[in-house]
Image (cartoon, rainbow, N blue to C red):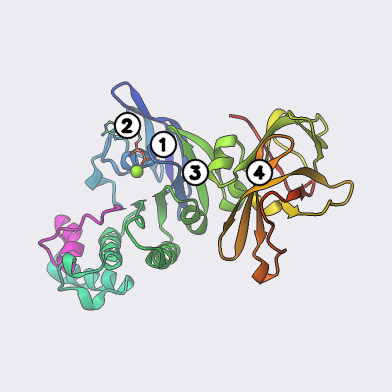
Amino acid sequence: MSEVVLEDVVKHYGTSVAVAHMSLRIADGELVALLGPSGCGKTTTLRMIGGFVDTTSGRITVGGRDITGLPPNRRNMGFVFQNYALFPHMTVAQNVAFGLEMRGLNKTDTARKVRESLARVRLAQYADRFPKQLSGGQQQRVALARALVIEPDVLLLDEPLSNLDASLRQEMKIEIRQLQQTLGLTTVFVTHDQDEAMSTADRMVLMNSGFVEQVGPPDQVYGQPRSAFAASFLGIPNLLAGKLSADHRSFAMDAGPVFRMAGQSPVAGETLLALRPEVIMISPEAPPEDANHLTGRVEIMTYHGAAVEYQVRTDAGPMLTARAIAPGLGGPALLSNTTPVWLHWSPSAGVIVSKH
Ligand SMILES: Nc1ncnc2c1ncn2[C@@H]1O[C@H](COP(=O)(O)OP(=O)(O)O)[C@@H](O)[C@H]1O
Ligand SMILES: [Mg+2]
């Protein structure tokens, strides 16, 4: 069993705190994505799990065994870096064989495992090439084969897709997820890209300045961000300040308007109402009387192919972004700026998040 547990792990660099009191349990066979903006402590956390960086305090266990003080080569973990980090003077096969030779495995078994490992990442024909003779995507698959060939207990991936172009990234993302599931490998995947995290992970760990902001399955974190930080990071530009009533049935904007709410929220009182651009309907006509709404004027329209995004200056004050389906795909006719518009949404469309 390769359950990874971080217990109150802290990392200081001098007086600056890179990781603050991180506690996390990664189940055997689970893929957890560490997600957050640059500098929030993702790489440091991953390197502490891998043993490349010492912990300032706290404990890390794998399968119940304390590994906090162990050097990297005694942790049996596979590591893939953003920049591939292949040995340029070694062939693909030699790169993949390296870890096995370090472990003193005999030549026959090494050759067999290297073959199997390269076949697994569809690079069997490239064994004798040098890294510079491969594309970025192929090099990253070599790095993956090298990490997997040692049959690691834990796979650690640090922004493995960042140097690849969009279509390759999509392909590699699926490939990594499939390999991880086939092998049942406990995996930690570091990324700053929410789509990458959402489409690969069993659970996402959203980090902010060395702290864990929110943990949960992707649909839960995406659907129910808990804080203003989480909401903004997950792409919700619309945050209205106000107060949720004690019965959670209404939200009074500080600027005046009151909206109906449905469902329960973990936070009440002074909060923010988060509205995804997709849940806000925009129309030149008034919505039904009882709909939650704000009036305003379109200031900026941006075209996104399948969608059109409107930035609307509301008469209540805040700028709101609404996203509509493009006219060519069945959406409403384009609205010009200066048009007075109604923005409206259903009581269950908003998410209440804490201000901090
Ligand atoms: N070797 C180091 N020495 C000093 N500060 C560091 C070092 N490595 C990382 N940091 C700092 O620790 C914080 C977290 O960095 P890092 O874990 O690399 O973040 P991320 O991977 O999320 O971008 C940053 O403020 C960074 O500047
Ligand atoms: Mg990093």
Q: Label 3 vs label 2: CA separation?
A: 19 Å
Q: Label 1 vs label 3: CA separation?
A: 12 Å
Residue beneath disc 1: 40
Mark nearest the camera among 3 and 2 is 3
Up the image or down, 210 lies above or below 74; here it is above
Q: Is residue 91 magenta?
A: yes
Q: Are marks 3 and 4 in contact (CB under 8 Å)?
A: no
Q: Who is closer to the viewer here, 209 or 251? A: 251
Q: Who is closer to the viewer here, 264 or 276? A: 276
**In-image side of 35 versus 128 (left or right):** right
The x, y position of residue 252, in whole percent, is 78, 32
The x, y position of residue 206, in whole percent, is 50, 42
- Circle on res. 205: 3
Q: Secondary structure at mark 1?
A: loop
- Circle on res. 55: 2
Mark nearest the camera among 3 and 4 is 4
Q: Earlier in the sequence, mark 4 or mark 1?
A: 1
Residue beneath disc 4: 320
Q: Is residue 158 magenta?
A: no
Please, what is the three-letter code of the amino acid marked with disc 1?
Answer: Cys
Mark nearest the camera among 2 and 4 is 4
* Residue found 21% across the figure and 63% down from its top: 96
Q: Label 3 vs label 4: CA separation?
A: 28 Å
Q: Earlier in the sequence, mark 2 or mark 1?
A: 1
Mark nearest the camera among 1 and 3 is 1
* Residue found 40% across the figure and 46% down from its top: 63
